[in-house]
Amino acid sequence: MKFLFSRSPWTKVTSILVLAGLIAACGSIVDKDRIRIAKIGDSYITRGDLYRHIRRMAPGERPHINTRGDLLTVLESYIDQELQKRVVADMLTEGKLATPPHEQIAQVFDAQHPEYSLIPENPEQFGMTQADVEAIQHRRERGIEELKQQYLRQTAVAQAVQEAAQSGAITVSEEEYQEEYELRKHELYKPERAAFRALVFPAQSPEAGPDSAEARKRLVRSEPWDEVAQSFVEARKAIPLQTTLADTGQRKFYTFWEQASGTQKGRILGPIIIEDWEMTIPGAEMQAQRASLTGYLVAEILEITPPEQMTLEEAKPHLAPALYYIEFMRGLRDEMDVEIYEEHLPEPSLFLDQTDDPLMDIL
């Protein structure tokens, strides 16, 4: 037996209207994605392009977008990347830029992201399917490619900026140096420096620890440095060293600066455990030689120079790279006739509730 369900004309009309509304809504989303927000030469950047750019960022790199200014900053960065890609393409065509080997980039990527390279021999034992393995491998290859493109952009732009600066195509005025100096003055300091003489007791000696402690005791008791040093050097228990260090933040010098920072002339330091200090030391017939020193260090401060504010002239080498880069990118924007339609940017509120994969609701 058949049951026939008839629909009234009003039901059909309602269904048609609902369907039309859904189609219109989808069309509206697509149309909004096509809104042009910038132009590079004859090419346009749309809202959809910007959404994809942000979505492809690693979770830790995705910016917090709370204002239109934040969104504008992201767009300007995206435009700069597109311009840099053109610099890369030109240099590759002219033979001025070499593509690094895939293996080299892969090694760097794997060191940064070991989670993508450590796939177990039997994935199923860890609840992984073949699809899971292939997805991880795909993300790894995509990451390697992105890292390669980043390297090419940085290398090409650095080379192009240097060439433009040397040829005089881009210049930085004294006013620009002064303005940048005032903005970054709080970070432009000459590091603390310490001149000292020391005895290094090599770690391979089983008596290195006790010997270094004995040396310190004798020095603290005001025995002359030369006498103490001679006794340990002639006994082949210690290596003499005299040098000057600047506190540039290197980890291997951290223990030294824990004791040396802010101290005064004549202070005895140590014993300090040091590792892989590349230093110049006296060699055979007093010929200087380079050596990697690991062991216990006992030192006497000869002079300590606290951090000092750089003058403008001293700061110029630190300011120049950023200023020349800005001038270079500004020239590229002018050359490529870049335009930004700020009034067409999407509402920043779309980005306020970001998750690990933002924009999925938007798209």
Image (tube, rainbow, N blue to C red):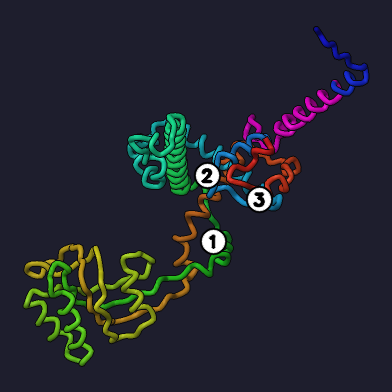
At label 2, the amino acid type is: Ala
Report the Cα–Cα distance between label 3 and label 2: 15 Å
Q: Secondary structure at mark 2?
A: loop
Q: Secondary structure at mark 1?
A: helix
For disc 3, the marked residue is 65
Q: What label sits on residue 58 in the rendered view?
A: 2
Of the numbered discs 3 and 1, the one sitting upstream in the chain is 3
> Looking at this view, is 140 or 15 the one in front?
15
Q: Could you say where residue 69 lies in the image, as x and y percent from the top left?
A: 68, 51
| Image height of 217 relative to 238, above or below | below
Is 225 on the left or on the right of 170, as rendered? left
| Image height of 286 relative to 50, above or below | below
> Looking at this view, is 26 or 96 the one in front?
26
Callouts 3 and 1 close, C-beta under 8 Å: no
Q: Please, which residue is most extreme toward the front here?
A: 1
Is 186 on the left or on the right of 33, as rendered? left
Mark whose residue sits in front, 3 or 1: 3
Q: Which residues are magenta?
A: 16-45
At label 3, the amino acid type is: Ile
Report the Cα–Cα distance between label 3 and label 1: 31 Å
> Looking at this view, is 49 or 323 the one in front?
49
| Image height of 246 relative to 259, above or below | above
> Looking at this view, is 88 or 221 the one in front?
221
* Picture mark count: 3
Q: What label sits on residue 177 in the rendered view?
A: 1
Q: What residue is rendered at 10% in x and 77% in y? A: 233
